[in-house]
Amino acid sequence: MLDLTDLSILLLFAACAAWLWRGHGIRERALALVRRHCEKVEVILLDDNVALQRLRLLRDGRGQRRLARVYGFEFTVTGEQRHIGSISMFGQHLGQIELAAHPFRVKADSDALVAESFSAKTYSNAPVAELFNPQTPTEAPPAEPLRDNAASAAAGAKIIQLSDWRQRHSGSDKLH
């Protein structure tokens, strides 16, 4: 016969199992959102996986603190380097997607990799339709394509070290 203690322990286990089951569904939704976002910004999601990093109290779009699941993932642009990103989920709803600073492609005359990086980009509380409908970038300045050293040497380009460039241009900031 079940007494009240056994019944409450059974209900506690059932609640934990339901919470874990729901968490798995939220993880699957986060993975789908990250896949679409990576396609939109033209990066490659590595390992096709998101992993729960922590549960946190974060502010939602209305400024109220809510419990959020923060998942981490890795992506690449060139296939050579791994970069980290994170996605925050308020239940089934997207909180924000953050990507670490990484090189990115600019749609120009050629589809060459550009040597510019941007700081961590945050997509917070934007409608999902706005996040995943590509629009032409208007803020990105035109940039020179990145070439590897062999192609640069063959084209007659001069390669300089960043420290040398900084030394030569360190006085120009003080004049303006």
Image (tube, helix red, strand yellow):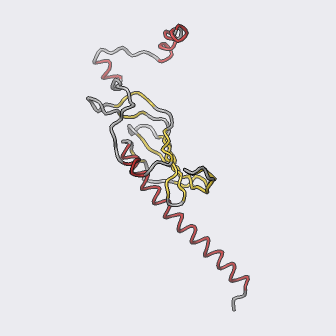
The residue lying at 65 percent from left, 79 percent from top is 10
Q: Position of residue 23 (x, y in %)?
A: 54, 63
Compared across the picture, whether 46 is left or right of 21 comes to: left
Rendered view: 28 above or below 140: below
Q: Position of residue 167 (x, y in %)?
A: 52, 11
- Out of 158 and 26, give the one closest to the viewer: 26
The residue lying at 32 percent from left, 20 percent from top is 152
Compared across the picture, whether 23 is left or right of 111 comes to: right
Rendered view: 120 above or below 62: above
- Out of 78 and 89, give the one closest to the viewer: 89
Number of marks: 0
Q: Position of residue 81 (x, y in %)?
A: 44, 37
Q: Name the residue furthest bottom.
A: 1
The residue lying at 52 percent from left, 51 percent from top is 95
Q: Quadrant of residue 66?
A: bottom right
Compared across the picture, whether 162 is left or right of 145 comes to: right
Q: Position of residue 4 (x, y in %)?
A: 73, 85
Q: Name the residue furthest left.
A: 109
Placement of the N terminus among the 4 image quadrants: bottom right
Q: Name the residue furthest front.
A: 62
